[in-house]
Amino acid sequence: MACRRRDRKTSFFRIVRLPEGKTVFDPGCTANGRGAYVCKRAECVRSAKENNLAASELKVPVPASVYLDVAEAFGRQETGDLEPLLGFAVRSGKALFGVTSIQNAARKGNVRLILLEDSAGTRTRERIARLLRNTPIPMVSYRGVRTLETVIGKPNCKCIGIVDDHFAESIRKASHG
C-alpha cells in the first residue's frame, strides 16, 4: 500500500475485508476476502497507519486496532525472540532492574550482560558507561517497538542486568539477529 513495492506475498503484512464487511489483520495471509498489503518495513507500516491506506484500498473504514495489530506484528518481527527471552529471564529471577542493583551485582561479578534501552536518559547512560569502564560486562542496546518497562512489566525500567550465562548468550544472539 505505502511504497507500491512488488514482492512475494510473505514479504508483506495483510489487512483483509472479510465477506461480511469486517476488517481484520490477517497474519497468515489466508483469510477469504479482499486484501491490502503493507511492506514489513517500519516506514511503510508507519505510512499505512498515518494515511489510513488500508481504508482507501479496501473501500471500508479500518479500525485503529487493526493498525495496532500490524504494529505489534512488526514489533515481533523486529525483536524476534528477544522479548520472550527477557520475559523468561525475569520470571526465572535471572534479571536485575535499575542501575544501582546492576552496579551492586557487577561489583560481586554476578552480571553477565546489560541491556540498555535506547531511550534511557543521560544520567542512566553515564552510570552504565562508568560501570562498563571498570568491568568487562557486555552491553546490548534495546531498540524494541515496545519499551522495556512494557515488555517486563516494571515501571520506569531502562536497563536490565542478566545474571545467568545461558540467558545472557541467548539474549545477545537474539538482539543481533
Image (spheres, helix red, strand yellow):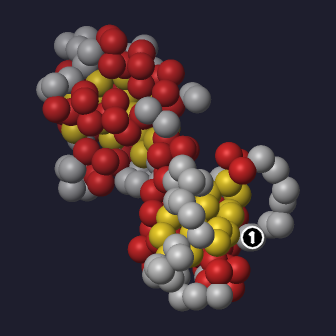
Q: Residues within 10 Å of mark 1 (few under 14, many from 20)?
A: some
What residue sits right under mark 1 in the picture? Answer: 2
Q: What residue sits 68% from the left and 63% below the top?
A: 38
The one of 121 and 80 positioned closer to us in this rendering? 80
Please identify the quadrant where the C terminus is shown.
Answer: top right
Q: Position of residue 144 (x, y in %)?
A: 47, 48
Please identify the quadrant where the N terminus is shown.
Answer: bottom right
* Residue 138 visible to the viewer: yes
Question: Relative to 95, is 141 on the left or the right?
Answer: right
Q: What residue sits 81% from the left and 50% below the top?
A: 7
Q: Position of residue 86 (x, y in %)?
A: 31, 34
The image shows residue 86, relative to residue 74, as above or below, that is: above
Q: What amino acid is at disc 1?
A: Ala
Q: What residue sits 49% from the left and 27% below the top?
A: 174
The one of 69 and 26 positioned closer to us in this rendering? 26
> In the figure, residue 29 lies in which quadrant?
bottom right
The image shows residue 89, relative to residue 2, as above or below, that is: above
Q: Secondary structure at mark 1?
A: loop
